[in-house]
Structure formats: structure tokens, C-alpha cells
Amino acid sequence: MAASASIPDTSLPTVRGLAAMIDHAVLRPTQTERDVVDACTLARAEHIATVCVKPFYVPDCARLLKDSGVGTSTVIGFPHGGQAPEVKVGTALNALRDGATELDMVINIGALIEKDYPTIEKEIASVVGVGHASEALVKVILETAYLDDAQKAIAAQIAVAAGADFVKTSTGFGPEGATVEDVRLLRQVVGDKIGVKASGGIRTLDDALAMIAAGANRLGTSSTKEILDELRRRRGEA
């Protein structure tokens, strides 16, 4: 007797809807211009939110995505956040001139841990200022794996006060990536004032859906194709 066909799960998000929530990451140290080209080809085909590249590749990425509706995002102070605020602003300005439309900046993790909150607010507000002047979104990376819940909450509150558009869990290069618990905590702290981006370790459709259910409205992943292909299969569209 032949096995019955699986029933498509139409309760899942649409492929286009999920794709519009994804920042496709091209940030590993060994990735090259070829990887950026491949990512931009995928992004144009799938209509994802942005391709996130290292600052060096912003000009290439912006050129490849021109008129596609896909944004070019880049990282500031990546991956440890230890640069002076002025250096982060300079990197942001260069990226914006090169065509970046979104900036993902890492906070100074050590400054947060030692409760130097004015430094955190200054650096976020400074990057937000130049970002918003160019109509670019700014996401603030907390690197939650190094913080306790109280520190995460304080950092998120500072990000809101400084005008950030998103708080983001992780770089993907720390000891742990996004967790459902951290996404839920950040959403509780920021409410509906700003977005929450889950990033780091999101490799499957179930990972992505769990983060969305916890409150994320943007996802950072390098597994975009695999996630969207799995969604098509489960919706019966493959």
C-alpha cells in the first residue's frame, strides 16, 4: 500500500512573508566576493529583507542589489564592540556612503558589564544619528551570551532611549547564538517600540518559527535557502 502524501501545512507563513523577515548573513572570515555575489543572487530571487556583509563588501553588495528592493546591511564594531564610539561612527559613515541601508552595531560589551551606561548610550545615539540622517535603520547587537538577564534588559532600554530601530541578540560569533528565552525577554522589555532581531544559530525552519513566535520580527541567518526550501516543502509548494 502506497504511503499517503503529507498534508500541506497552510498555517505556516508564506515563503514571501518569511523571506521579507530575513537578513542573509555573509560574515564568516573566509567568505569572499564570490559568496557576496551568490548571496545577492539568492536575495533578488527570494525577495529577502537584506544581505548583511562586512563593510569591505558594501559597495559590491549595493551595486548587485540596486533596484531589487533588497537592502544592503553591514556590521559596525563587529564582532566584539570594543572600538571607540568615534570609530564606529566613522565606519557607519563610510558604509552609508558606499550604499548601506541598514547598520548592525555591536555595543561595547565590557562597558555595559562595568555599568558604563553613558558610553553605551553615546555610541548607540551617535550611530543612530548618522544612520537616520541617511534614512538607514540601526540595529543594536547586545551579544546576549555574555550578559545576564538584568544586563540584557538595561542594554535594550538604552537602545530604545537612544533611538535604535531594533535590538539584536547576537553576532553569531559568540559562545551562543539567539535563544527563544532571550528573544522573549527582549520583546517584553522593548514592547512594540522597536523591532527585535534574532541572530546566531538559526539554521532550520523550526528555529526560525520559534524565534518569530517568541517575538522576533527580523532574523539573521546564513541558512536562508535551506529554511525557505523547507518552508516550500511543508506548505506543499516544492
Image (tube, helix red, strand yellow):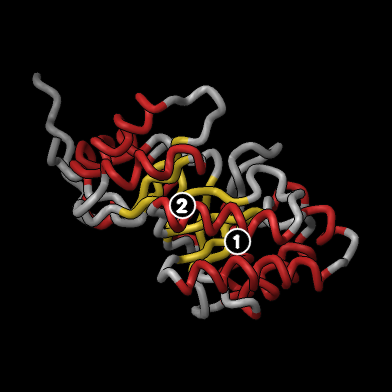
**On screen, residue 197 above or below 125:** above
Please, what secondary structure does the residue beneath circle 1 have?
A: strand
Residue drawn at point x = 38 percent, y = 53 percent: 99
| Left or right relative to 20: residue 106 | right
Quadrant holding the N terminus: top left
**Residue tagged 1:** 140
**Nearer to us in this view, 98 or 204:** 98
Q: Dot 1: few (<14), some (14–19), or many (≥20) neighbours within 10 Å?
A: many
Three-letter amino acid code of the residue under disc 1: Val
Name the mark on residue 210.
2
In the rendered structure, are the residues bearing label 1 and label 2 in contact, judged by CB atoms less than 8 Å apart?
no
| Left or right relative to 213: residue 169 | right
Q: Quadrant of residue 230?
A: top left
Please, what secondary structure does the residue beneath circle 2 have?
A: helix
Quadrant holding the C terminus: top left
Residue drawn at point x = 41 percent, y = 37 percent: 204
**Residue 47 x/y as whole percent:** 23, 50
Name the mark on residue 102.
none
Give the residue furthest to the top: 1
Three-letter amino acid code of the residue under disc 2: Ala
**Nearer to us in this view, 68 or 154:** 68
Q: How many marks?
A: 2
Residue drawn at point x = 29 percent, y = 38 percent: 40
**On screen, residue 2 above or below 18:** above
**Residue 116 x/y as whole percent:** 86, 67
**Residue 111 x/y as whole percent:** 84, 59
Q: CA distance from mark 1 to mark 2?
A: 21 Å
Q: Looking at the image, can residue 155 be seen? A: yes
Residue drawn at point x = 41 percent, y = 51 percent: 98
**Nearer to us in this view, 214 or 28:** 28
Give the label, 1 or 2, closer to the camera. Answer: 1
